[in-house]
Image (tube, rainbow, N blue to C red):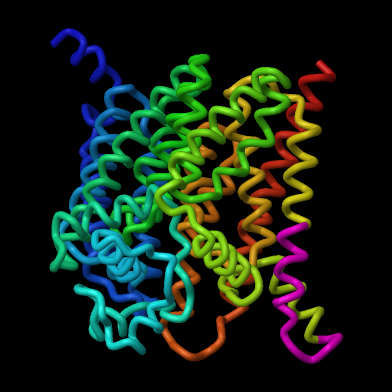
């Protein structure tokens, strides 16, 4: 009781009921936007997320005491929990999760055949039918989900082999547990790195993160949890455990591979070599259930198509595409996409090699810029791709990812008028805010460093 009283001392809750009201707005608003709004209702999405981000900004700005931090961490978990009992409304990717899971539980490799090939054969596999097939958003593409995600698909479909809603609930529940773990890990890491613990609320209460991970069932949640676990164990000098957790992160979503080059300078050659060996062995074990010639070929084809055919909510790519149109009169994505990906990879590798940082508390900021470089040069940037930058920004001093997460939902305007091209004025306005805020932050920190050195 004495500890509880000390935690409450100086709390906003003691002085005003406003934070409580804002917390309730976040919980109800997350439930409404995540369960009651359809993908094509852009006006409602725009206004709903706008209200949620306004409440989020006020709470994060006003929280002071550790009691408030813990209270609103719990609010963040509740915001996610209220999304458990509904199907995703702003994404239809989960139908592919069910498809892959139902193949796996019958011993069929999810990379063996295209969904359209099963359709041509009259759906010979139990659980795969015309109704599920018609809801797939990519029936002519091979799956792209690595082993941890595939294992969760199979586990959910094993428990509820005939129920889409039941399988979705299992997947959401597992992601909820991982999100709870991510929030706790961020809080522990902030304390370990001597950073303000209130920064955890940047992630815990972020409306985009809440709705996209548990609400819309995106496995960035698994990638983030295992990456933060790797970071935590690394900071505690438990390198084998860290390498194993990093392997699980990569096996959830492969974006966290971008962290590996930065470990060479940070750990030194000998320690980094052992880290890579353990990571490689753990990764190989995780991929063994999927490994085959078919997997290598079809998974590679899926990644190749991602850079050569898909385009959505991009920034630098759209500029390059416009230049290509002026020169040739047609879309040169098959050439521009791989070139931009190569440029991004080169920038990231050079950044890792030139990095001077040799402590774990500097890794999140370095990786934040690495992943954002990848996204800036990408042909496709879905809103949920911003969840990882949001987690990393908590452990850095940059906040442009918060702005990006707020404007990323503007990309849903594309679904308001299916068949029509993306409104590049909206996309351009969003990225103008992101790049403008990033430039302002960079200049401000650069000026601050100059003042410090001068004094």
The answer to whether residue 387 is above or below residue 300 is above
Task: Depth check: give the residue in front, 239 or 186.
Answer: 239
Q: Left or right: where does residue 279 sit relative to residue 68? A: right
Q: Position of residue 238 (x, y in %)?
A: 49, 17
Please report the residue visible at 66 percent of the width from the left and 49 percent of the height from the top: 438
Quadrant where the N terminus sits is top left
**Percent coordinates x, y for residue 313 in the rendering:** 57, 70
Residue 53 in sight from this viewpoint: no
Vertical order, 124 against 297 (above or below): below
User: Residue at horizontal 43%, vertical 77%?
Assistant: 114
Judge from the rendering whether residue 210 lies leftward or rightward of residue 242; answer left or right.
Answer: left
Asked if residue 416 lies left or right of residue 164, the reply is right
- Most prominent secondary structure in the magenta stretch? helix
Q: Which residue is drawn at 61% across and 77% down?
A: 309
Q: Residue furthest front?
A: 293
294, 1: nearer the viewer: 294
Q: Which residue is drawn at 28% across and 36% down?
A: 72
Question: Is residue 169 shown in magenta?
Answer: no
- Residue placed most toward the observer, 94 or 6: 94
Residue 333 left/right relative to 45: right
> Magenta includes 327?
yes
**Residue segment shown in magenta:** 326-342
Residue 451 in the image: x percent, y percent? Answer: 79, 24
Considering depth in this image, is 369 or 222 the residue closer to the camera? 222
């Amino acid at each position: 009781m004495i500890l509880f009283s000390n935690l409450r001392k100086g709390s906003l809750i003691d002085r005003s009921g406003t934070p409580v009201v804002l917390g309730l707005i976040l919980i109800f608003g997350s439930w409404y936007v995540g369960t009651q709004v359809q993908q094509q209702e852009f006006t409602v999405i725009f206004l709903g997320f706008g209200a949620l981000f306004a409440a989020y900004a006020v709470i994060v700005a006003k929280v002071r005491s550790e009691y408030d931090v813990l209270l609103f961490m719990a609010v963040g978990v509740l915001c996610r929990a209220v999304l458990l009992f509904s199907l995703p409304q702003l994404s239809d990717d989960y139908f592919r999760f069910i498809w892959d899971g139902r193949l796996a539980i019958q011993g069929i490799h999810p990379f063996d055949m295209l969904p359209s090939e099963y359709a041509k054969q009259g759906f010979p596999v139990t659980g795969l039918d015309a109704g599920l097939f018609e809801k797939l958003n990519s029936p002519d593409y091979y799956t792209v989900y690595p082993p941890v995600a595939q294992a969760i698909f199979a586990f959910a479909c094993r428990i509820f082999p005939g129920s889409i809603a039941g399988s979705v609930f299992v997947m959401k529940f597992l992601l909820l547990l991982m999100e709870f773990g991510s929030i706790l890990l961020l809080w522990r890491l902030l304390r370990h790195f001597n950073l303000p613990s209130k920064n955890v609320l940047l992630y815990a209460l972020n409306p985009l993160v809440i709705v996209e991970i548990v609400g819309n069932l995106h496995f960035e949640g698994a990638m983030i949890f295992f990456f933060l676990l790797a970071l935590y164990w690394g900071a505690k000098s438990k390198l084998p455990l860290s390498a194993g957790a990093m392997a699980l992160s990569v096996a959830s979503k492969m974006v966290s591979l971008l962290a590996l080059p930065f470990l060479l300078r940070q750990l030194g050659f000998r320690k980094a070599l052992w880290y890579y060996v353990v990571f490689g062995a753990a990764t190989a074990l995780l991929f063994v259930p999927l490994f085959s010639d078919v997997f290598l070929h079809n998974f590679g084809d899926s990644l190749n198509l991602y850079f050569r055919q898909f385009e959505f909510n991009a920034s630098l790519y759209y500029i390059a595409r416009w230049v290509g149109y002026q020169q040739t009169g047609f879309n040169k994505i098959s050439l521009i996409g791989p070139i931009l990906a190569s440029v991004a990879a080169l920038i990231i590798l050079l950044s890792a090699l030139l990095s001077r940082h040799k402590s774990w508390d500097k890794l999140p900021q370095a990786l934040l810029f690495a992943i954002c470089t990848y996204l800036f040069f990408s042909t496709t940037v879905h809103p949920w791709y911003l969840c990882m930058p949001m987690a990393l920004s908590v452990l850095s001093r940059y906040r442009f990812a918060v702005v990006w997460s707020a404007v990323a939902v503007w990309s849903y305007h594309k679904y308001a008028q299916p068949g029509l091209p993306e409104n590049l004025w909206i996309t351009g306005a969003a990225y103008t805010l992101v790049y403008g805020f990033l430039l302002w932050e960079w200049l401000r920190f650069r000026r601050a460093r100059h003042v410090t050195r001068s004094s």
